[in-house]
Image (cartoon, rainbow, N blue to C red):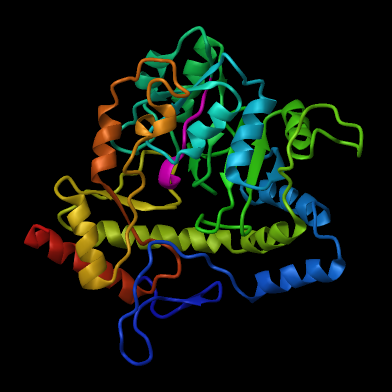
Amino acid sequence: MIRGGATVGGVTGCGVTGDGATEPITVARPLIGQEERAAVDRVLRSGMLTQGPEVAAFEEEFSECFGLGRACVAVNSGTSGLHLGLLASGVGAGDEVIVPSFTFAATANAVALTGAIPVFADITPEDFCLAPRAVEAAITNRTAGIMPVHLYGHPARMPAFRQIADRYGVQLFEDAAQAHGASLGGSPVGTFGSFAMFSLYPTKNMTAGEGGMVAVATPQIGRLVRLYRNQGMERQYHNEVVGFNNRMSDLHAAIGRVQLTRIGGWTKQRQENAAFLSEHLEGVIPPAVAEGAVHVYHQYTIRVPDDRDGLARALREEYGIGTGMFYPVPNHRLAPFRSGGHSTRRQADLPETLRAAAECLSLPVHPALAEADLERIVGAVNTLARAGA
């Protein structure tokens, strides 16, 4: 039994309205309740709206919540977190950073914004994350780092990447935008690299309304991220580096602090919802979970080898079920990163990336789903799969 008609974070399940009409089921939904509203009101009453005590408390509580054992630095977006983390780690013009192409463009954008070149490597078909063999094949004497993405909430193969990084004397970074609370071999994501970035965008597993959190391996990297986010200042009017205005406001931090108290329950519900889907879906390929991995299911992503787009359209038009295609255009085929753009390297052959881009479809898995919603999703997918949709 999953749950029926429950309220999660002030949001009820998406099943049936009072007049008997069927509501659409969305693929993602921010969960904002009265506690978040009260926290924002508290900050408004305080009169201190910019980076202040709420941000400081959020940084400490975030590290504690996910067992990171590392200092955390809050910024205004996940992309800013990647950008500043790379800068603080010494990445710049002339360097190369190996990244997946099958991810949101922010991963490659952040590398390019430092002046470095994103070098795209292929993924493993099981977990959609960077493939260690492809990464090792892409290393050159210009490689400064490797930045896997813990895609859809599944941890990338970090022990293998650590071995490669150590062998070639390069740094290891983590794009953990979608992976709050994920782990591998008992170690939380965010504890493997020189830095890790967690996104706090509204549709992530938890949100601050907007923002990012950078977990740092050393005090030096942490200090530089703090400098870069605040115009290069630690003390007002004593600028040490050329910086940015990438601060998080206390309003956003207050929302994030409330969400930290709920993320554990939400993650458990996502995992239960995913288990229900995997047990009952037919005719599609459900997501795999590697041995020793804790998947937090930012997305529940299936493979549809035949007519993925047709299945998505039928789910939407015939059953009112929203889906997501993440990501139909790989980064290496985006205009900024095609040959002659930011990349000066010959584009690698990325067959698994192209296959995933054509086959992947994300079904609703968020914790606002009621049991009736899950049954409706399963019934619709199975009916369409049997009909060859």
Residue 118: x %, y % from top left: 48, 24
What's the residue at 36%, 47% (across, down)? 326
Q: Nearer the viewer, residue 231 or 33?
A: 231
Residue at left 20%, top 68%? 380
Q: Is residue 113 above or below residue 34?
A: above
Q: Position of residue 212 (x, y in %)?
A: 63, 46
Q: Is residue 224 above or below residue 264?
A: above
Q: Is residue 281 visible?
A: no
* Magenta stretch, residue numbers: 145-154
Residue 320 sits in quarter:
bottom left
Considering every residue shown, the one lying at the far left of the view is: 387
Q: Is residue 15 above or below residue 226?
A: below
Percent of width and height locating residue 206: 56, 57
Residue 41: x and y in percent read 76, 72
Q: Residue at x 53, y 41 (%)?
A: 176
Q: Is residue 327 visible?
A: yes
Question: On the image, which quarter does residue 70 sit in?
Answer: top right
Say how many tags the image has. Answer: 0
Quarter containing the N terminus? bottom left
Q: Quadrant of residue 23?
A: bottom left
Name of the residue lying farthest toward the top: 141
Give left or right: position of 2 versus 355. Answer: right
147 part of magenta stretch: yes
* The C terminus sits in image quarter: bottom left
108 in magenta = no
